Image (tube, rainbow, N blue to C red):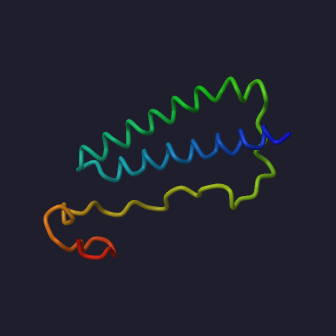
Amino acid sequence: MHLATYLGLLHTSLETLADAYREVGCGHREEPDVAHTCAVLAGRIDDQLAQLGPVVERYGEHREQEPERLHATGLESIAPAPSACCATSRTCTCSPRSPR
């Protein structure tokens, strides 16, 4: 049965996602809506991690031999927040997107 392996993958993935939301929120402090949304989402994931705790206690968790390709590495850095260029112009210059 691989349940313990999948619980380990889920636990690691949720931790990585919550950390990424916190990092994005910190990187976009000057945009209150982004910072707040990231904090709310990270909090929800923390709640999911807390709910996962009893399941892990009951069935165990196996993290040692999972392939590294199955783990997200998280964020290396946060790009500077665009100054609302996408909302104010027809062409976004902050990312390689096609014109609106």
Residue furthest to the left: 88
Q: Quadrant of the N terminus?
A: top right
Q: Quadrant of the C terminus?
A: bottom left
Left or right for 62, reference 73:
right
Which percent across, then down, holds residue 41? 42, 39
- The image quarter containing residue 38 is top left
What is the number of callouts on the image?
A: 0
Residue furthest to the front: 100
Q: Residue at x 78, y 32 (%)?
A: 60
Q: Residue at x 79, y 48 (%)?
A: 64
Left or right for 10, reference 38:
right
Left or right for 60, reference 42:
right
Q: Residue at x 20, y 74 (%)?
A: 91
Which percent across, then down, holds residue 90? 16, 71
Q: Residue at x 56, y 47 (%)?
A: 16
- The image quarter containing residue 85 is bottom left
Which percent across, then down, holds residue 54? 68, 23
Q: Is residue 53 placed above or below 10 in the rendered structure?
A: above
Depth check, front residue: 99 or 64: 99
- The image quarter containing residue 4 is top right
Q: Is residue 8 placed above or below 98 in the rendered structure?
A: above
Which percent across, then down, holds residue 73? 58, 58
